[in-house]
Image (cartoon, helix red, strand yellow):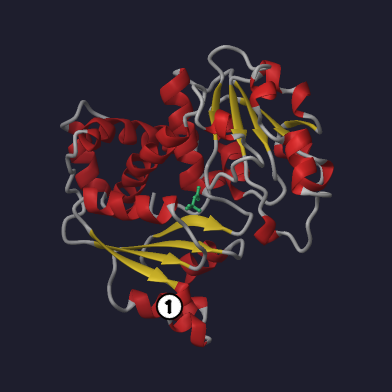
Amino acid sequence: MKQLLAAADLSKDEIRFLLDTAKKMAPIVRQDGTIPLLQGKTIVNLFFENSTRTRTSFELATRKLGAGSLNFAASTSSVAKGETLIDTARNIEAMRPHAIVVRHSSAGSPHWLAKNVSVPVINAGDGFHEHPTQGLLDLYTMEEKLGTVAGKRVVIMGDIAHSRVARSNIHLLRKMGASVAVCAPPTLLPPHPETLGVDYAYRPEELLKDADVVMALRIQLERQNRMQIPSLAEYTAFWGMNQDRAKLLKPGCIILHPGPVNRGVELDPEVADGPRSVILDQVFNGVVVRMAVLATVCENEKLKAWLAGHGGK
Ligand code: CP
């Protein structure tokens, strides 16, 4: 792997390798340890959209691997003076970083960037296209809690039409043998959802009782030209994950959310903080999964040697 642009590009073996690598790194990170595979390297975080979890966990993952990180925020850069994405990236590339992590509102921008720079590019979310490292950390969290996703039923609820997280999860989960269903009002589903290889329903009650995993998603108002539901109150009443709907779930069913959570809209606070919620586990797992991705993309030889010394691949 020389880059990570989309979950759709990953083979089952590559997904397994990344998850197993993250699993080996996790106990060391939990005990505050470092794994200095990228010493002397610099990773640039090029974020043209806001982020809390993704940017900070890439930064922490970079530090845990012994590398330095350079954070670029579009709002305080020369992008505000009209500089293009490609000019920005080429100028940053001229400073000789070892990888660029990019988030951008335009779908396909990481692919465009990867064609125009010679350093590895990692997609940290592009428009409503993909968010591959989020999909990987979600999958890692599901395996951590359930053992495997093969044969498991994953229900994704919310704004599927505008969600890069849903798209990356669907690609990864289907490859790893899960069955996926999506649920949203018709205006928040993509046209012909069955072409994604998923089942779908307009009402959560039709899907929740069979779920092993429920993932709630935020309504991506920033990606909608106009509000595509009558009101947030109506959305919450019919599609929100509240305590009554949580009572429909099987014992052992877990609830995920990629964040940021709009409490009281797609997820009630009692459910977000309740016993089924694994939201903060997702956040920790984001660090180790991103360590695995950075090490694989930037320094595969040292990583192979490290894995050999830690029980093999
Ligand atoms: N899940 C996610 O991408 O969160 P941030 O927008 O905070 O990075």
Question: Viewed as shown, does residue 35 lie left or right of 260?
Answer: left
Tell which of 169 and 219 is nearer to you: 219
The residue singled out by tag 1 in the image is 76
The mark total stands at 1
Q: Residue at x 54, y 20 (%)?
A: 150
Give residue 34's position: percent from left, percent from top.
18, 43
Tell which of 291 and 16 is nearer to you: 291
Question: Of all residues shown, which one is farthest toward the bottom?
Answer: 81
Q: Residues within 10 Å of mark 1 (few under 14, many from 20)?
A: few
Q: Residue at x 68, y 60 (%)?
A: 223
Give residue 129's position: percent from left, percent from top.
62, 54
Q: Quadrant of the C terminus?
A: top left
Find residue 267 and report its image quarter: top right
Q: Is residue 189 among the parts visible in the rendering?
A: no
Q: Residue at x 57, y 29 (%)?
A: 271
Give residue 100's position: percent from left, percent from top.
38, 64
Q: Label 1 amino acid?
A: Thr
Vertical placement of residue 77 versus 298, above or below: below
Question: Viewed as shown, does residue 55 lie left or right of 185?
Answer: left
Find residue 170 and report its image quarter: top right
Q: Is residue 150 among the parts visible in the rendering?
A: yes
Q: Is mark 1 within 8 Å of ligand 1?
A: no
Give residue 53's position: percent from left, percent from top.
43, 50
Find residue 181 and report its image quarter: top right
Helix, strand or loop at mark 1: helix
Question: Viewed as shown, does residue 15 lie left or right of 177?
Answer: left
Vertical placement of residue 9 versus 151, above or below: below
Vertical placement of residue 207 versus 293, above or below: above
